[in-house]
Image (tube, grey):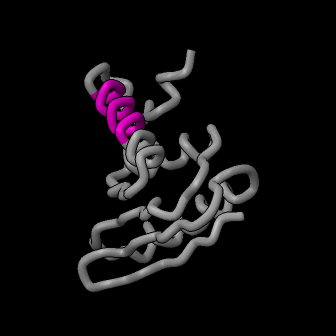
Amino acid sequence: MLRITTQETPQAMTLVLEGKCRGPWVEELKRSWRKAVASASGRVLRVDLEKVGFVDERGKELLAEMYDAGAELNAAGLMMRSLIEEISAACSAARRSGNLGGGIQGRRA
């Protein structure tokens, strides 16, 4: 299960995730992300992963899309911070190679 809570301030909109980002919950996160993008009105978009314990491949791909679109990904734990670093590196490499929107998919063999 994945709990998704939206926190709004005048400066930012944050999707706070709790649980496991996998299976059908990835689609639910995608819907929440689209709503956030539509209503952000120029505010910073953040995704808080501090209480996430697991992310499957589809979840990683979605987080990479969010990051590539400008979302700030935040985490506290070692595993999620490592995932954010992986996403950041993959998106940066994709941009350097001219493969915009390549995200984490470019890292699969």
Horizontal and vertical percent for residue 14? 40, 72
From what the image shows, is residue 86 above or below residue 27? above
Residue at image location 42% in from the left, 81% down from the top = 7
The magenta segment is: 85-95
Q: Is residue 2 left or right of residue 99?
A: right
Residue at image location 53% in from the left, 77% down from the top = 5
In depth, the one of 88 and 80 nearer the eye is 80
Q: Residue furthest front?
A: 78
Q: Where on the picture, by quarter, is residue 28?
A: bottom right
Q: Is residue 24 left or right of residue 79?
A: right
Q: Which residue lies furthest to the right in this view?
A: 24
Q: Which residue lies furthest to the top in this view?
A: 109
Horizontal and vertical percent for residue 57? 62, 38
Work out which quarter of the rendered image holds the C terminus and state it.
top right
Residue at image location 52% in from the left, 71% down from the top = 35
The secondary structure making up most of the magenta span is: helix
Is residue 90 shown in magenta? yes
Horizontal and vertical percent for residue 102? 44, 30
The mark total stands at 0
Horizontal and vertical percent for residue 68? 37, 44
Work out which quarter of the rendered image holds the N terminus and state it.
bottom right
From what the image shows, is residue 96 above or below residue 12? above
Q: Is residue 60 left or right of residue 58?
A: left
Is residue 105 shown in magenta? no
Residue at image location 31% in from the left, 19% down from the top = 97
